[in-house]
Image: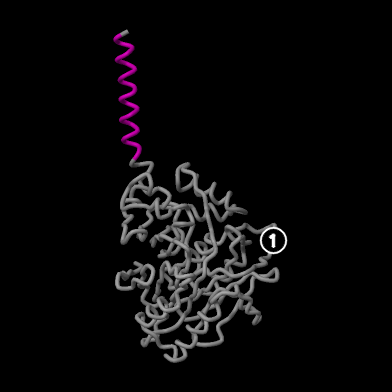
Amino acid sequence: MKKIIFYIFSVIIAVFALALTAFPIVFHDEINSLNSLVQKQPGVYTMKYDGDYGLDAFLMTGAKSDVELESFVTKKLLKGLPLKLNMTEAGCTAFVSRNEKGEILFARNFDFEYAPFLQVFTKPKSGYASVSTVNLSFIGYDKTNLPTSGISANNFLTLASPFLPFDGMNEKGLCIALLSVPKSEPPFDSDKVTLNTTTAIRLVLDKAATVEQAVSLLSDFNIYFSGGINCHYLISDASGKSVIVEYFDGELQIVKCDKDYQIASNFIACNGLNIGEGFTEFERYNAVENFLKEKNNVVSVKDCENLLNAIGIVEDGTDKLQWSVVYNSTRLNGKIWTHRNSEYAWNFTLD
């Protein structure tokens, strides 16, 4: 009996030792990624995602619903930890302009009820490196449940972030941001794979170097909008070319830039329809356009900062401006901050 007990105990010790040895190997990428998670301010984070997040595999099948996307991310990135997406409507403003050196600036703010956010850097082997901003409330974080710095069980959901960008820039200077609109009517082709709101952005960031490539890629896929929140996309590249991509009247619609700048807000702009939400979308658009005209479309990052802070939505005394970011497509750097607290902004560079 003593020999049997000793044998069983030895086996348990051996299995436990093997598990300890295997854990850092099996979870190498996850450990490295979470080790890089840094809280800049309460509810504001940065992370360098390490390893393959499986975009190429995802593009083979896509997801026709949030449930299917949740299932893929749960299996591929979260090792079985359940994920529940929660997309809600947001008001945003974005624009493309130039600075005094002729460098391309892409600026956007994100207005929402409450959105802790993560700036994530990715460097896939089969795609372009990029930096993007993720609304963490989309995956269930809130004021009472926030990540911290480093490795912890509560931080594990941040590993889903590569599939959830709301805006970003890649190493080719291609920039993209989503903005909500009142309605959409996307086409559907049963022979095409379907993507959701944010995986469409990941597709563009990883695979497109120019506006033309971005539009071509998006046209190769169906799209559905998570949570039923319709969106369009402002896209620009390092040459300064820009478009707004919309899904309306059963087609992918392109709103081309007919000026030396382009602005997007929360209204459908294709074919001059200007279908808005009935809030402040046109006032914000006009404020940006008037400012750019006054500046002859020559703006500094500080100008963008002041403008974004000024046009952020305040509703019933509540400040809804969650984050603002300015990407420099020429230098591949930028500046990002939370709310209107640009004095606490930080600069970043895409290596």
Where in the figure is residue 123, as x and y percent of width and height?
Answer: 40, 60
The x, y position of residue 178, in whole percent, is 52, 68
Q: Main secondary structure of the magenta part?
A: helix
Based on the displayed image, in which of its 4 quarters is residue 257 positioned? bottom right
User: Amino acid type of disc 1?
Assistant: Asp
- Along the line of sight, the residue nearer the viewer: 129 or 151: 151
| Residue 196 vertical position relative to residue 342 in the rendered view, above or below | above
User: Residue at coordinates 33% horizontally, 69% vertically from top-left?
Assistant: 349
Would you say residue 31 sits in the magenta stretch? no
Q: Is residue 169 visible?
A: no
Say whether residue 192 is visible.
yes
Q: From the viewer's side, name the closer residue of 275 and 212.
A: 275
Quarter assignment of residue 327: bottom left
Q: Position of residue 311 (x, y in %)?
A: 45, 78
Q: Is residue 40 above or below residue 92?
A: above
Assign a secondary structure to mark 1: loop
Locate residue 47 relative to residue 265 in the image: left or right: left
Q: Quadrant of the N terminus?
A: top left
- Residue in view at x 60 percent, y 78 percent: 255
Residue at x 48% of width, y 58% of height: 164
Residue with the mark numbered 1: 189
Q: Report the side of 64 relative to 35 (left or right).
A: right
Scheme of colours in the image? one colour
For the point 58% across and 63% down, which residue is it? 229
Residue 198 image offset from top left, x and y in percent: 52, 61
The C terminus is located in which quarter?
A: bottom left
Which portion, as a residue range, is magenta? 2-23
